[in-house]
Amino acid sequence: MRALLLGVEWRKGDPVPDFRELSRQRVEDVVAGLKQCSGPGYDAPIMWMLNSIWQVYGDDAHRLFFPSLSGSYAGEVLEKMRRHYARVQEGQRAHWARQGLKKADWKK
């Protein structure tokens, strides 16, 4: 998958390509391709590619690349990922807010 995302040829035994080689043009091409993907069978690869892009570009990816996914199946997958992340963050906030309190004093 990594070689596919980077657009390089890779064979078993070759060194694994580095994500730092992921150019902005390549990301734009990949995002354009993701807009063409549809159906539940594509969820995992779409999530993997979106996460990989985010690892390289950080929050700039949400501004530079991800808005173009709006209205596509990949955009729906991205929204599911965002909702999941928000739930995880809320759970972590609740966990840290309860630290040092007796269980009977926890707010639900």
Image (tube, helix red, strand yellow):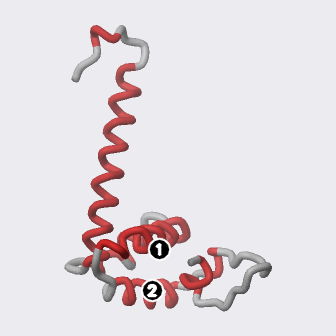
Is residue 108 left or right of 98 when viewed as pictured? left
Q: In the rendered image, which quarter is residue 87 located in? A: top left
Q: In the rendered image, which quarter is residue 34 located in? A: bottom left
- The residue wearing badge 2 is 30
Q: Amino acid at mark 2?
A: Val
- Residue drawn 32% across the image and 52% down it: 84
- Residue drawn 42% across the image and 72% down it: 61
Q: Secondary structure at mark 2?
A: helix
Local crowd size for mark 2, using a 10 Å CA cut-off: few (<14), some (14–19), many (≥20): some
Q: In the rendered image, which quarter is residue 44 located in? A: bottom left
Q: Secondary structure at mark 1?
A: helix
Residue 107 pos. (x, y %): 24, 19
Q: Quadrant of the C terminus?
A: top left
Of 28 and 9, which appears nearest the observer? 9
- Residue drawn 38% across the image and 79% down it: 65
Q: Amino acid at mark 1?
A: Met
- Residue drawn 64% across the image and 90% down it: 8
All told, the count of numbered labels is 2
Residue 96 pos. (x, y %): 40, 27
Residue 103 pos. (x, y %): 33, 11
Of 39 and 101, which appears nearest the observer? 39
Q: Quadrant of the N terminus?
A: bottom right
For marks 1 and 2, give the CA distance.
8 Å
Of 22 and 33, which appears nearest the observer? 33
